[in-house]
Amino acid sequence: MHTGSVNRRRFLRGACASAVTAGVLMPLWTAIAQTGDIARAYPDELLSIEAYTKGRIKTGDEISADNVEHVRDLLEPIKYEQIAKLGRRLKVAKTTTDLTRLSPWEYLEATLRNQGQARFDAKGNVVTLEGKPWIGGNPFPAPTSALEFFAGLTLSWGRHDASFYCVKETDLSPAGEVQFQYESGWAELAPTGRVSVIPKPYWPGHEDTLRYQSVFFAAPDAVKGTSFLNVWAYDQSTFPKLYGYLPAFKRIRTFPSEQRFEPLIPGSTLYLSDAWAAGDPLLTWGNYRIVGRGPTLAAVSHGWNSAHPNWEHGTHGGPFGKTFWDTTVELVPEAVVVEAMPVKFPRAPISKKHVWFDLRTSLPVAMVSFDRRGDPYRSFDGAYALYDAPGSAVMDGAHPYWSWTHVHVFDSQTGRMSRLEQVRTITGGHTTSVNDLSIYDRYLTNVALMRLGDS
Amino acid sequence: MSSKINWITALAALGVGALPQLSAAGAGGTIGDTDMSYTLSGLIRSETAFATNGGQNPLNQTGNLYNGVPTTRVSPIATDTATRDGQDYNQVLDMQQFRFQLDGSLKFSPSFTLIGKLRGIYDPDWYHDFDPALSDSHAAGELYGKPNFFTYDVQGLAHPNPLEWAGDNYMVDFPALFLEYNEGPLNLRLGNQQIAWGQAIFFRVLDIPDGLDYRRHSVLDYVPEEFSDKRIPALALRASYQLGQNWLADSFIEKFQPTVYPNPNTPYNVIASQFTIVDDYKQYDSRFNFGLRFKGDINGIGLQGVLARRYNPDGVYRWTASGVDRDIPGLPGSGTVLAKTPFEVDSSGVWSASEWFNYAGQARLNGVTGLNSAVNNFQPATGLLGAVPVPNYAYASQELNEFFQLAGGLLNGTANAGLRGWLARDYREETNIGGGVSKVFEGAPGSWNDQLIANVEVLYTPDRIFTNPSLDVDFLRKNETIAALVLEKYQRFSSALPATYMVGQFLYRSQSDLFGRYLGGYGGSFDEAAPGKTNGYKAFAFALQQPFASLIWRADLAVLYDTGGGLLLQPAVRWKPNGSYTVEAFYNYVNGKLNGNPTNNALSTANYVKEFTLRVGMQF
């Protein structure tokens, strides 16, 4: 049996390696391939918060300003400040070792089936060994470079072939007061890299398109009807086509799409660039490199609030108890911190971003962006869950639905917070759906924008 | 089977059926659409425009340029001086309105939704209004006494807009009330609705389906809203169909609804108040407009084409018999003859030839041919009154002064009235054929041509019918071409500020100005009949929006330059402190006298506008 200190030394040796070698006790993906469970890849101290903190923090405890110092090295800097100074609290859950609870089933299956078939073409786009668009799943499940983390993430954000999220957003002032509340719908549809819906892996005739994505606002009245449609080319060196419907103009117009660091609606700190920590085409960012590695605390499970009929979450913290979502985190045994720079955005307010990837799944669990001076600027921390709880479940077809559940977008320099949550339904009778191809006609065409634009 | 996925398939066999399901898993896993649902939201808002220059609209009685100005009148029968009294008032307020809006939808099923929007406007009339009693005016017609702010007066029609109810100080209407059906790529809308086409903003090249409602704040409203509050809704069936990935087909058939102009003696009146307008829309209220549009993309080039058959909502004007039996003072019985001409004796009419030509110029009409057509089209009545056609300005001036002297009571030794002119507003059908091309350019990141959008739109209308500058019953028929170039860009000038949105536009119209007035009536003045304007109408527009952090504040600037010497400038600020409140403040500066004769540009019609507007709204 390996001692804790021996395991730490092995882990740190791996962290210093130029290539990413995951797993301490055995290669991570060997463990995953054999059993679907990561337990055999990591020692107890990386699977148990009790072991890691030597009993100072236990499963079921709450991390608060009183004890955050024990886990400071497991938190990105802005989250640490939120806990230490702003009243944020995190509930601690047991580390998930069953990989099927950390990603959609079909996506995971396709990842394993297609492993080893991905490469970069001359332009830098991910293709199969035959040079065709990617065929589904994570093309680089055992990443060997920083770029491979982002390549896999950019190819598939939500890891479903078609997703429609009902979203409620609350924007708070630096004083912690609720200033704005919005209800919106966000649709994503993958015509390539499909893992679940027929036809797959490609939608014939759409092989040159990576993604159809739209966002529209259903409430309040001031923004109702505003909607945007992005059509992402498969070539990640080009900007998406952007169509927008503004109620003031009452018609669909083409918009420039390279300004992706702008607030979309009053009060919001969310940018288009923030989506899934990879909201821009892969090749519009560059200088990808790994800048950190180690365990982290992240909300990769338990994010779904099945007790609420609309899946809404409780809040706490800040001056009025409304600033932060009630969040459950677990010890993630290995996270890789990848840095990227917005090379095609010369006057972006951001000089770089750091994204924490859960090495087991290559999912982004946190992001911190830095301003032009290199100071921390904004953080983006999300929560995920398998929508499966004792006595209730949401299915995506044959399997429980896996998805994001809530996210914090925090401007650490102004203190403004935008918090978003995925809910079951929003104003207008829209309902969250997954792998339903009818979302294309309902949300992802110009006719759809006109209809969503209302009167 | 690969060992890699053995455990997954094994778990799959175990997993399905072991987990309870919230809803039946349909094809693809839709979690479950809601049953009937409804939405309701709205806003209330105060809109105030403060005049910063006295606010006198020269097209109103109280702003008439000849009020209190002794004007010499030379005619074959006398030479005298008349001083018009239209009650010369300065205004502090150009506008005070209170607005209430309610937006709702009722979703019956995923395919059927009822959508409605209710709008209510109230104007408390806090202005220094024209009072006809003070000028001893007895002008015939509902709108020619004390100002009526909202009634759209059409002979024989109680509700020219079927879903609108309006009176002196209020209007209530449904800008939208329609049933929507959506199935796959097909979308249908049946009911009262507004339809907008085209990429150009404000320059309505392809935006042909709807007329405009100028009654509230004319074209002087908050520029970023464009015409969203102005489009006249119509009962229509609209069908849109997504053809594949890149193409959209859009069509409509709608009940014809005309543009509605402000009423006389209201702050933003655009028709000289010495005219009485008889709107003949009743003859056309069961007519229909049709339109078809295709819009798509081929290899990164945006294309669109439109074809429509419609009634031009602006309408066309001509002289019409007044039907007002009111004697010329000192000529008993003359009223029955005068009633068969386009004229009415009244103190609110024109008092002198100088005023006649001045206002003909402002209306983009020809004062000489206008007199001749009134004389010729209404024989023998005009002949019985001694009117004859004239060859030039000098003769016209003399004849007109004679008419005005008699109407003012020369035979009784007074000079206290003039003649009102009666016009009929008619409508004519036309065919519109148009198209557009757009492209998004790519350049070096951050450069001016990176993500620059260029758009060209052209509309051709063969045999468009125009008001004859003579107001003759024979309207003019001309082929018209309208074209616009639009350039749009977001540009970040600093990493500290969000990107600035900018749009620049150029407009060319071959036969008419920005408001549809025929260019042949341009250039007139108090001492010259309109020579007309050649080489078309040209205008430039530029607008920019600069948001600040979190979009709480935003600054806007809009500039419209008419190459004939007109300028409209609107700097604006928008403040949205929270979800409930919005404050918009903007200043309208119009100068129609930048160079030479102001009747050579379109904007001089609003030259009096120098106003600060404040809108404070609350959403709920």
Image (spheres, rainbow, N blue to C red):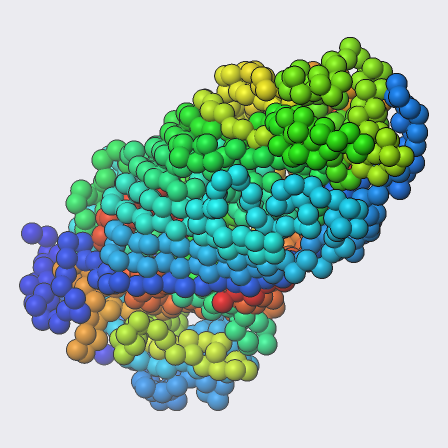
Q: Residue furthest top?
A: B391
- Compared to B538, does B85 lie above or below? below
Q: Is residue A252 left or right of residue B98?
A: left
Q: Is residue B14 left or right of residue B185?
A: left
**Camera-side residue: A388 or A350?**
A388
Residue at 29% in and 33% down: B243
**Camera-side residue: B555 or B219?**
B219
**Camera-side residue: B272 or B117?**
B272
Q: Is residue A232 left or right of residue A201?
A: right
- Which image quadrant for residue A352? bottom right
Residue at 30% in and 63% down: B37
- Compared to B275, does A371 lie above or below? below
Residue at 22% in and 52% down: A436
Residue at 21% in and 43% down: A201
**Residue B581 location (% of width, % of height):** 58, 66
- Which image quadrant for residue B336? top right
Q: Residue furthest front?
A: B332
Q: Is residue B16 visible?
A: yes
Q: How many marks?
A: 0
- Compared to B253, does A411 lie above or below? below
**Residue A64 location (% of width, % of height):** 46, 85
**Camera-side residue: B66 or B451?**
B66
For the N terminus of chain A, give its image quadrant: bottom left
**Residue B487 location (% of width, % of height):** 58, 33
- Which image quadrant for residue A365? bottom left
**Residue A45 location (% of width, % of height):** 32, 79
- Compared to A294, does A340 lie above or below? above
Q: Is residue A287 visible?
A: no
